[in-house]
Image (cartoon, rainbow, N blue to C red):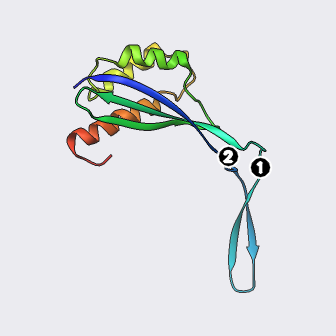
Amino acid sequence: MKITEVEISVFEVPMYPPLTDVVEITSQTQKKWKQSFSFSGAEAVPIQVMKVRTDEGIEGVSTVGDWRYTELSWQQILQLRDIAIGKDPLDKDFLLETLGVASRFFEPGWIGAFDNCLWDISGKYFGLPV
């Protein structure tokens, strides 16, 4: 089995407020907790979704990031494609080690979505849950 395509789709989703505080609400009979949120004013945020496709028709899917952390740049996507296309998605160690060396000056954490896609492909290939 070989990787034939790595695709990134970008979606805008409604902004959800991050958890900023947990407030205790007390009553005579019980203790409760309420989440307190702050709103940044943004109405929508981009979410990237990665799909890795194989020549056997198996597709691995993972979200890449959201407004809180790294999203893939075009440079990272092109480098990922150059390294991954034509390789065996079941050889996760080789792929991740190669990507780690090739991208050592990129922001940390961006390879995680690709790793998740490889695990998704492995699970589908072997018929096992991931």
Location of residue 75 with respect to 113 vertically, above or below: above
Proximity of marks 1 and 2: CB atoms separated by less than 8 Å: yes
Residue 39 disc label: 1
Distance in Å between CA atoms under marks 1 and 2: 9 Å
The reply, left or right, for residue 42 in relation to residue 124 is right
Front one among 19 and 67: 67
Where is residue 23 shown, x and y percent of the image?
Answer: 75, 64
Q: Nearer the viewer, mark 1 or mark 2?
A: 2
Q: Amino acid under label 2?
A: Met
Front one among 106 and 127: 127
Crowdedness of circle 1 by 10 Å Cα count: few (<14), some, many (20+)?
few
Location of residue 45 with respect to 79 vertically, above or below: below
Secondary structure found at label 1: loop
Front one among 47 and 111: 47
Image quarter hosting the N terminus = top left
Secondary structure found at label 2: loop
For label 2, the residue is: 15
Residue pictured at 22% horizontal, 45% vertical: 127
Crowdedness of circle 2 by 10 Å Cα count: few (<14), some, many (20+)?
some
Where is residue 76 shown, x and y percent of the image?
Answer: 51, 18
Residue 7 position by quadrant: top left
Residue pictured at 27% horizontal, 37% vertical: 122
